Amino acid sequence: MPVTANSIITPQTAISRTAILTTADIAWNAPVNIVNLLLAADNVNGFRGTRLYAIPRVAIATANNIALYEYTGTTYTLIDSALMAVVTPTASVANAKTDFGYSEDVPLIVRAGYGLVAACGLSAANGIVVKLEGGLL
């Protein structure tokens, strides 16, 4: 995609991706129990993320580190993480949302040709839903 100097590049295709984390991964420098959020092959011109959060579908008895990695080929780089708080969801207790803090004002930028994957620090039998929203450039 040719770029003109002093012009803004805006997302061309809105996307919303979901992943379910179930198995713990604590190999922070070489993760193996990861789930794709954005495939590198889909990210031809770059990605601008405006929302990323995780919601447990199970009781979280101990704080759980939710990690986000950028990858290309077989190289994974930890770029962000958020700590999921202890919670026991019930009919009267909400499934607590762990927000990574991205927004229109503070977007997550992923360079062209790179993908995104997520992992959790503790296993969660029923899973932790991770939701990514934004746009492909």
Image (spheres, helix red, strand yellow):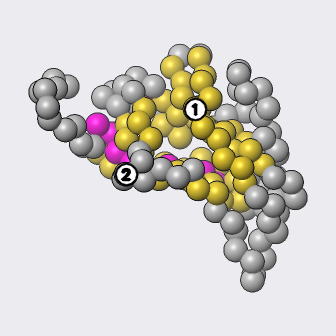
On the rendered image, what quadrant is the N terminus found in? top left
Viewer-proximal residue among 18 and 105: 105
Estimate the x, y position of residue 98 in percent, counting from the top left: 64, 57
Quick one: which residue is furthest to the bottom in this view?
Answer: 92
Estimate the x, y position of residue 88 in percent, counting from the top left: 82, 69
- The three-letter code of the residue at mark 1 reads Ile
Quick one: which residue is furthest to the right in this view?
Answer: 61
**Which range of residues does the magenta coloring cover?**
129-137
Q: In which quarter of the image is residue 95?
A: bottom right
Viewer-proximal residue among 70 and 38: 70
**Residue lying at 82% horizontally and 44% vertically, measured from the top left:** 122
On the rendered image, what quadrant is the C terminus found in? top left
Please give the residue where the numbered disc 1 appears in the rendered image: 79
Q: In which quarter of the image is residue 41?
A: top left
- Magenta stretch, overall SS: strand
Viewer-proximal residue among 137 and 8: 8
- Vertical position of residue 13 compared to residue 129: above or below: above
Q: Under tag 1, what secondary structure?
A: strand
